[in-house]
Amino acid sequence: MLKVKFVKRLPDFVLKVDLLVDKEILVLVGPSGSGKTTVLECIAGFQKPDWGEIILGEKTLFSSSKRINLPSYKRGIGYIFQEYALFNHLTVRDNILYGVKNILKDEKEKQLNEILKKFDIFHLAERYPVQLSGGEKQRVALARTLITKPHLLLLDEPLSAMDRKLRERLCKEIKELHGQWKIPFVLVTHYQYEAKLGDKVFKAEKGEDKGEIIMKFHQSA
Ligand SMILES: Nc1ncnc2c1ncn2[C@@H]1O[C@H](COP(=O)(O)OP(=O)(O)OP(=O)(O)O)[C@@H](O)[C@H]1O
C-alpha cells in the first residue's frame, strides 16, 4: 500500500496531493504543467514536498513532522522516465545489469537471463539502445527496473513517443505485467486513452483557496 499526502509550493500554484494506492494501477491525468511529474519525483525522492507524508508498506519514505526524507536509492522504487533514460553507450544487457549490485556473478547471469526471456528481448542483449524500436526500448526499461525488485513502479508518460497501434499493444503489456508483479503502479499521462489502464484514475483540477491557486488530483468516476 502506498499512502501519499503532501503539499508542495511550485512557482505558479500550490500542489496538494492525497492518494492511496493498493496493489493496483493508479493513473494521474492532467494537462502539461499540472504537476504530474512533480508528484512522481516527490514519491521517488528526487524532489522534496514542503509538508506531509509518503509511506510505502511499513516504510516511511518522507515525513515532515518526523523529519524523515529517505534518499531515492533507499526507497525501493522503480521509475520509468518519459524517454526511458537508457544509457546509450551500454548494451541492453549492461543497461539491465546496471542497478544489480552486491550479488554473485552466476546469480546475476541467472537473473539477467530470466528477465531477458520474460520480456522477450533475449535476442537483443548485445544491441545498443539506438538499434531498438520504441516498444523494445520500453521492454528494456521495464526489465532494467523490475530486475531490482521494486515495491512500487512509477511510470512517467511511458507511451507518449509511440504510434497508436504500438501504444495499444504496450498498454496491454503494462496491464499484464502488473497482474504478474502485484505491486502498486502509478502512471502519469496527459492522454485520456492511457487512463483506461487505471484501476483508479485521478484528474488534475485547479481551484482557489484563500487567494492562492491550488492544484489537486480528484478521483474520476
Ligand atoms: N525544478 C523546478 N523548479 C521550478 N518549477 C518547476 C520545477 N519543475 C517543474 N516546475 C514547474 O512546476 C509545474 C509542474 O510541472 P510538472 O513537470 O510536474 O508538470 P507535468 O504535469 O508533469 O507536465 P508535463 O505533462 O508537461 O510533463 C510547472 O508549472 C513547472 O513549470
Image (spheres, rainbow, N blue to C red):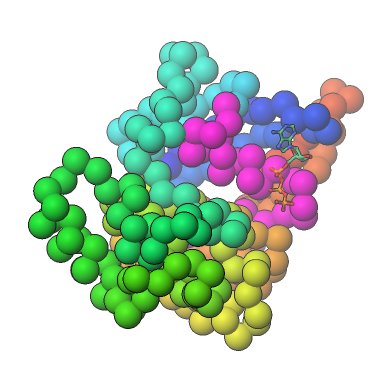
Vertical relation: 112 (above or below) 10: below
Residue at 41% over, 49% down: 78
Residue closer to the observer: 1 or 114 = 114
Residue drawn at x 49%, y 67% is 129
Q: Position of residue 45 (x, y in %)?
A: 49, 33
Does the magenta-highlighted stretch encompass residue 56? Answer: no
Judged left or right of residue 112, residue 142 is: right
Residue 161, image x, y percentages: 65, 69
Tell me the residue at 58%/31% (across/down): 47
The quarter of the picture where residue 162 lies is bottom right
Q: Furthest-front residue in view? A: 89
Q: For the C terminus, which image quadrant?
A: bottom right
Q: From the viewer's perspective, is 69 left or right of 6?
A: left
* For residue 165, above or below residue 201: below
- Return the residue nearer the eye: 29 or 164: 164
**Residue at far bottom of view:** 165
Q: Position of residue 146 (x, y in %)?
A: 34, 57
Q: Quadrant of residue 31?
A: bottom right
Along the line of sight, the residue nearer the viewer: 198 or 150: 150
Looking at the image, is 116 positioned above or below residue 74? below
- Quadrant containing the N terminus is top left
Q: Quadrant of residue 210?
A: top right
Number of marks drawn? 0
Expressed as whole percent of the image width and height from the top left, the position of residue 192 reads 69, 68
Ligand 1's quadrant is top right
Residue 172 in view of the camera = yes
Decide whether residue 33 is among the magenta residues.
Answer: yes
**Can I make out residue 143 in this image?**
no
Residue located 51% across and 38% down the image: 43
| The residue positioned farthest toward the right in the image shown | 211
Bounds of the magenta span?
A: 22-48
